[in-house]
Amino acid sequence: MSRLSDSPTFAPLSKTLQNTLIDILYKDLPHPPSTYLSMLPQNESTEKTPNPIKYAFRNADASNYVPLFPGLGKANAPYARSVPATNFTPPATLPDPGLVFDTLMRRDAFEPHPGGISSLFFAFADLVIHSVFNTNHADATINLASSYLDLSILYGSSQEGVDSVRNKDGLGRLYEDVFADNRLLFMPPSACALLVILSRNHNYSAQKIYEINEHGTYKKEFKDDADKLAQDDEIFNRARLVNCGYFMQIILGDYVGAILNLVRDGYSWRLDPLSQSREVSHDLTPRGEGNVVSIEFNLLYRWHATLSEQDTKWTEDLFNDLFEGQDFSTITRQDFMKVAHEKMIPDPDVRKWTFNKLQRGTNGRFKDSDLANILHNATSWRAGAYKARGIPEVLRVIEVLGIEQARRWGACSMNDFRRFLGLKPYGSFQEWNPDPKVSDAASKLYKNIENLELYVGLQAEEAKKPMAGAGLCPGYTISRSILADAVCLTRGDRFFTVEFTPFNLTAWGYADCQFDAQDGSYGGMLTKLLFRTLPEYYPAGSAYAHFPFLDPVYMRDHMRATKPELADKYTWTRPEPPVAEVPVVVSTKEGVREVLENEVTFPSGYAKRLEAVTGRRDIDHAFVNRLLLENVDQWTEYFAMETERLIKTCSLDHVGKAGTVLYVDIVRDVINMLPVHWICEQIAGLPLKDAQKQYEQFADVCRYVFLNSEPSNDWRLRESSIQTFHEFEEVVKEHLGSRFRILDSDRASLADSLPFLTKLYNDDPDVPDLAVSLFTEVVPTATHWSQAIAHVVNFYLEEHRAKEREEIVRLAKRRTPEARERVAVLVRAALAANPPVWGVYRTVHGAEARVGTVSIPVGTRVFASIKEANKSAPAGARPILGIGEHGLLSSRFFESTAPVVLGEILGLKDLKRAPGTSGKFNRFEATAHGAPQQWYTNARSDLVPWPESLVVAYNGL
Ligand code: HEM
């Protein structure tokens, strides 16, 4: 039988289709593959180190980043040349470098940066460039740093460098406040202070990775030193991946955000060079294919003109010290080399390094106050504008060295570089810089615009004016190049692209270095780092944390002019130093009770935060509570039935054994959902499209109002809570305003809430306040209710508590006050062992506080450790819950609903934790200020203060 494809008419077409299809299918996958599970065998260096996991980690010298080209971009390898010099001018005919500096580059007057960029931005830029450029003076073709943003300034560029900073105590940590690159010691102190923050972030990440112990393999006791080192290596390397992820995100978010003026103009959009995409030809766009920095970019990034007035003064003092008062204009290359060899050799022990004459404490750390002071200064100091005649005279010798270096490298001309970038070459010196003083001088020195050398051409080009999309305001040629470079540096790095995975960074680490566009900083990762590392010095809402790369006065004025309503949400003044650097921990039962109950001295701030959410002060919600309790028996029956229903609908059975063993995520799908369904369907009549999402929204409210202890979360939690409130208020107002129409509406399911809403309305017909009161009474405590139940279930799932478990199930059926009271005692025992909140923060207000024999000054932060306090409570005594008796946790409501829910759950036949990891809480214990704290990891790889998953198995027959 002849086929259509064989016919003379269709055969060519069929062949073409065939080819296209094969082409597409072939291109579906990358060739060669972009990642492997371990090193390729032909790679000589890995044969000596066969540990396969090394493939997933950054090598000390950045070798093996590209499996098929292991030396690409490694440290101690040649620079690349991006542009061949076609118009080579013999050095003898070029003007004297000193004369070039004196006529075109020397700062005539300080000009503040026109885009409001702070000196801290350039301290960070200093870290970026030192990560990728380190010219070897003995052989200037060689770059001693790798071409990757691998934080080599912190970790070193060789095994020796990495070993110098690592503590190797088994926990993957660095020594306290150390870094590996001594060149930074001679930079303005804000660069070192930022680097110390990144050093602390390494240790923070290592600690979290160790505490969360994702695979359960980390331990405290080791067989021998090799065992300890193996664990240390793994945690160190994962923490480094996370920390580098942070560095990359600061570059793409905060740094590029400032360069493009996105932060000033309120855009959270960012350049995303990491994403997977396809070209028109269906080819995968390359990622992680390596990078080698070039001499052109080395010259382009020497941004010495941007030194702030204060940093210039600092540098002058440094040079006066090093060169013993020698006139800056007379310092020669030889003088500089002599000083470098005699006075700039640091101690071999990095733990002894210091900068800005700071002292290290006995624990090796710098004082938070010293670091914060330097960082606050750098944010408040305005950088200098890019401009010709903008480089401080003190840097004359360095510029001369730079010009000479560029000539020895045979760098291309300014116009060659522009042609390479696809830009129009300059036709005249006036076109390059219209300032006649500058163009005249340049034309006298270089005669023909084609002779203008790259370095001078870039640094003395006319600067751009600030506008939408332009914040950095260098010369146009620099501005056009740096974004290309940012893309190459990030997209070319295997660890930022194809290997940037939760598997390598751990789920927590991966989630931790993702940006949050709703954080009040338009995705500021440095913001998160400052809040986290120096929490006492960067209070929530501080512009110094939210916009550290912009002069706060400039940013405030700009925001007041463009978005006045938003400007009021920030504090623009410099943060006041705290009374104490670390919170005072209170852990006795009496002490903790005093802190929790004395609202005058230890204000909880709940009311203030509720006001921030609802916009209402002194909210009366007692009447809602009264009405809720009038119906408590009805709600109790509802909770019992709803528990049964949710268990039934959310259970999963084994293939082929229907109904025998069933599994259910009792926390995620049942316990967390109960108050959500109750509030939405029985109380407020909210349409429940996505119950899990609604749970997360309610959880944000709970966290904002009751547990808001981390400034980095404050903005997001508040904004999310405000939105949840508005949605809630709008629906409730609509129902109350037209309560007789609800039944007729197409949302008939909302009818369940009608009786309660009607009752509420009859009690107090003031519609707007009713919605606020209702929200305040039921929403903030919803998640805590679930958390308390989850803790109790978890406690009684233990095999050795089977007797108590049965007792709860038996008593739950009775619904008598005596039965309820006995269950309450069992519930308390569970909550005493694991209270929903392990501790709360308060700040001493009004007058000095006395807790036991300790007096605590006004303004001191206090951490009341509920966990510790409950340890000393007698069995059966009411545990301290730390969340007060509000809403769903008011004792009558809780003690009535809890037993029936527990009865339904604990009464499941042959109930046990499901085998495997999801069968236990993803809980881990951390320590803060020496007091225990608990966190949970969840399916979103986030850390949350409450459990979100516990899978149990039961016998369905
Ligand atoms: C007070 C502040 C600064 C001082 C004292 C300083 C000093 C120096 C010195 C001594 C060199 C080496 C010159 C040579 O050996 O040829 C250098 C090179 C360089 N500087 Fe700066 N610098 C400062 C700020 C900055 C800033 C803010 C940037 C850019 C963000 C920058 C970018 C560079 C670059 C890219 C190099 C070339 C590095 C290399 O080839 O190894 N510098 N600087």
Image (cartoon, helix red, strand yellow):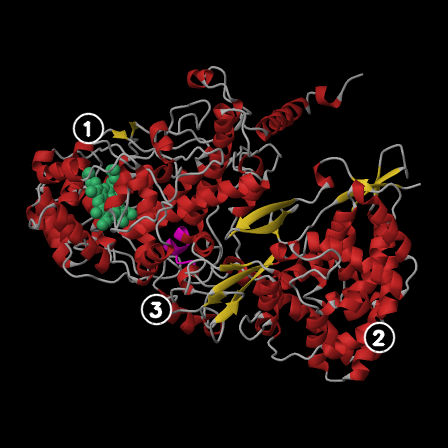
Q: Is residue 390 above or below residue 738?
A: above
Kind of residue at badge 3: Val
Which badge, 2 or 1, is on the more N-terminal residue? 1
Q: Going 66% across and 44% down the picture, which residue do you hit?
A: 922
Q: Which residues lie in the magenta part? A: 255-263
Crowdedness of circle 3 by 10 Å Cα count: few (<14), some, many (20+)? Answer: some
Answer with the quarter of the image where residue 921 lies.
top right
Please tell me whether mark 2 or mark 1 is closer to you in this view: 2
Which badge, 2 or 3, is on the more N-terminal residue? 3
Task: Give the residue number, with chain letter if any, for mark 3.
Answer: 553
Crowdedness of circle 2 by 10 Å Cα count: few (<14), some, many (20+)? Answer: few
Kind of residue at badge 2: Glu
The secondary structure type at the circle numbered 2 is: helix
- Give the CA distance from mark 1 to mark 3: 46 Å
Please tell me whether mark 2 or mark 3 is closer to you in this view: 2
The secondary structure type at the circle numbered 3 is: helix
The quadrant where ligand 1 appears is top left
Q: Is residue 152 left or right of residue 511?
A: left
Residue 258 colored in magenta in the image: yes
- Give the CA distance from mark 2 to mark 1: 86 Å
Do the residues under discs 1 and 3 have CB atoms within 8 angstroms?
A: no
User: x, y percentage for residue 438?
Assistant: 14, 55
User: x, y percentage for residue 865?
Assistant: 58, 57
Do the residues under discs 2 and 1 have CB atoms within 8 angstroms?
A: no
The secondary structure type at the circle numbered 1 is: loop
Which labelled disc corresponds to residue 138? 1
Residue 664 colored in magenta in the image: no
Task: Give the residue number, with chain letter if any, for mark 2.
Answer: 630
Answer with the quarter of the image where residue 152 lies.
top left
Q: Going 13% across and 42% down the picture, which residue do you hit?
A: 400
